[in-house]
Image (cartoon, grey):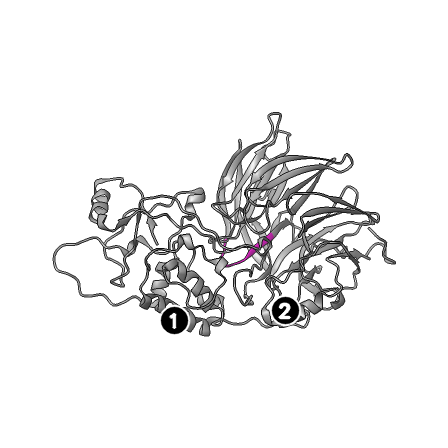
Amino acid sequence: MPFVLKRAKNASQKEALQQMGSKFTQPGVVRWSAARPAFFLDWMFFHEEPQIAMKPDFSNGRFPSLPPPEIANPTGAKRLAGTLCLAAVLGLPGCGAKPPPPAPLNGKELAAIACAQCHAVPSPAQLSREEWPYLLAWMGNYLGRPAEIAINPALVVKGFVPPQPVVTSEQFQAIKDYYLEQSSLQYRLPPPSHSPPATKLFDELPLAIDASVVSMVAIDPSDQALVVGLSRPSGMLVLQRGITTPIEVPSEPVTFERLGEVCRVALIGHLGYDARAGQIVDFRMKEGTQRIIVDAHPRIAAHRTADIDGDGADDLLVCGFGDYPVGRVGIWWGGTNGPREQVLLEEAGTTWGDIADLNGDGRPDIVLAIANNRPRIVAFVNEGGRRFSERTIVERPVGWGYNRCLLADWNGDGRLDIIETAGNNLELRGRPIKNNHGVRVLQNEGDWRFREVLFEPLPGAIDVAAGDFDGNGRLDLAVVAFYPDWRLPFPQTFLLLMQQADGTVVRAGIEDQYWNRWMRVAVGDVDADGDLDILLGAAQVPMGIPTEHEARYGQLLQGKASLLLLRNRTRTPGSIRSP
């Protein structure tokens, strides 16, 4: 696999490059993103960019003693230009006596070479011994070592498999042995989180609609209507006072905002791949009109509207998860001249974004969750004058599985905290239980310091909403999971975390008869009685269900509606009325 080199900046670099001239080739540079949120239902894609590149030489099994030439590490999208080896493995010819033959690298050292420039080197503890062979067979293709076991062919982009092996068969075997042996020692299967007791706070109201996949749920704060995005086929429904109004849209709705008379909706473009068809559309429901604000955008995961630069006009944040070749996150500035985009990030994998003043300086900042080969939450700090400085809030190991997050004041100190979900489990065959999956609260300590104060395990966590459901003055969370723990009779796909006066949390769920494969959650006051209700949307698809549980999954779904309204009984206990 090639590694990108910069042009020589001085005579010594030029001489070093000339000495290695026999090893230069002209292939492309493989860039890749190692994590995909469950919602996008997609596989890895790659792209190449012509560069002067160099084929690594692992033949002597050792790192050379002399320093390598300077390696390109551009910003933006090019920051993540990945390769599967380090330029440091190339040695420059020396003079004088030859050193003694070096000992071969072990599997751990070889893994560091093969992985480090695409992503952080994964720990064997991240997966069980049973899951590693599939992942290694997949990744082996990009080391020039085709899979020796059956894997999903959609995972491998043949155009980016190197023409010659990057590692010898012995070296690749050493890498595999390292992960298999160490995972047996390091991986610990989390114990099942037994289903919590069903809450008595809500009445359950299933809502039957003609769709098996719900891509978006929202409760319109202006008129208490339920706004539902659909897939298979794409569409949008508005449910209000027993009347259902369908709205035709070209692709799946994913996020919703009410802006005065306008309902602003993000359309993903295409659920399965990046068709460069993402749109932001303004709907005027009463007039029955719509206007496209942003068009032909990389696959959109989220949007948010606010006056970011303080000029009195609304600005628009658009988070393009994208895929091939990159994603894009930018601000479309408002004002009399119409929206103009300022790109903040050109990188695939943004799953969530929001606008809020996190440091208390009175200027709204941008916060993003990125789920690629460098999973992290980043802030673009508003410096004024439409200038931003990028700051990493937290960085996670590769394969973390970021999905949706939110900003909310968890502890009531006046500062916005970050509530994150991790739970992507799309690519791996067995949908393994991962120790890091669940919901976390990162408490804002000020001065851009965040401290984890809560972690609640929930395999496959994908979406979260917040509100004070029981009226005790403390924030509570509603979380849904798409890749649950199938060791349980009713795999947990919905969880309530009710915060007590002392800051501890009590877990709660819903009755087993309302089980579904929930994928979306929203909070709002549906009946205008002063308390918060919860709306759940399901994705009733076989994708991602372990083979041995497919029959049971089908039984659990029988007769289940793909929408469920949880009507809060705190203020108005009694019978349920239709929204």
Magenta stretch mostly in which secondary structure?
Answer: loop
Q: Position of residue 45 (x, y in %)?
A: 48, 52
Kind of residue indicated by mark 2: Glu
In the rendered structure, does residue 99 fall within the stretch colored magenta?
no
Pick whichever, 149 or 312, lies toward us: 149
For marks 2 and 1, give the one nearer the viewer: 2
The dot on residue 550 is 2
Q: Characterize the local packing of mark 1: few (<14), some (14-19) or many (20 or more) Cα atoms within 10 angstroms.
A: some
Is residue 57 something that shows in the picture?
A: yes
Q: Earlier in the sequence, mark 2 or mark 1?
A: 1
Query: In the picture, which quadrant includes the N terminus?
Result: bottom left
Check disc 1 and report the residue beneath it.
177
Residue 308 to residue 171: above or below: above
Q: Position of residue 22 (x, y in %)?
A: 22, 50
Q: Secondary structure at mark 1?
A: helix
Residue 111 to residue 211: above or below: below
Left-right relation of 379 to 206? left
Q: Secondary structure at mark 2?
A: helix
Residue 60 to residue 26: above or below: below
Residue located 67% across and 71% down the image: 552
Q: Position of residue 369 (x, y in %)?
A: 55, 50
Pick whichever, 299 or 203, lies toward us: 299
Part of the protein shown in magenta: 395-404
Q: Residue furthest right?
A: 575
